[in-house]
Amino acid sequence: MADAGYTQPVKRNDVLVLGKQALGMFLVGTDSMEASHYISEHDKKIANKLAYVMAGGDLSEPTRVSEQYLLDIEREAFLSLTTERKTLERIEHMLKRGKPLRN
């Protein structure tokens, strides 16, 4: 690939995230969905972790962050979910049966 002229892409440092303002909107949405019985308690936990990453974490205002910052908080969220029994059950079920488990 190097002989063909490939170079590693430049990592971005200008990804706009909205911080607490967006995080609050996401959390209200997941609370509403759980209260309406559209999602389970564990679905809400997963969605809240995803919301945290999408909002850029607990930033107080809209901020431009690096790709690496987002990857780091995504990894942290994923690893925290892997300590949950229900997450492990979902992963095992998907690997064995090829279908999602709603627990």
Image: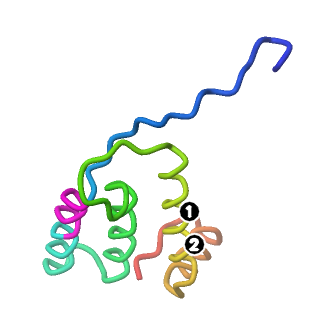
Where's residue 88, x and y in %? 58, 80
Closer to the camera, 10 or 50? 10
Q: Position of residue 80 (x, y in %)?
A: 52, 77
- Looking at the rendered image, the quarter that the N terminus falls into is top right
Residue 3 belongs to magenta span: no
Q: Which residue is mark 2?
A: 79
> Between 17 and 27, which is closer to the camera in this rendering?
17
The picture places residue 46, in percent across and down from the top left corner, at: 39, 71
Which quadrant of the view contains residue 2? top right
Q: At x 21% / y 78%, what residue is drawn?
A: 34
Please, what is the three-letter code of the amino acid marked with disc 2? Leu
Give the Cα distance between marks 1 and 2: 6 Å
User: In the current view of this chain or complex, which residue is farthest to the right?
Assistant: 3
Magenta segment, which residues? 20-27
Q: Is residue 51 above or below residue 92?
A: above
Image quadrant containing the C terminus: bottom left
Label 1 close to label 2 by CB (< 8 Å)? yes
> Can you tell which mark lies on residue 75?
1
**Residue drawn at (50%, 52%), measured in percent from left and top?**
69
**Can you give x and y, in whole percent of width and height, for residue 63 in the image?**
31, 46
Circle 2 — which element?
helix
Answer few, some or many: residues within 10 Å of disc 1's Cα (few below 14, many 20 plus, some between 14 and 19): few
| Residue type indicated by callout 1 | Arg
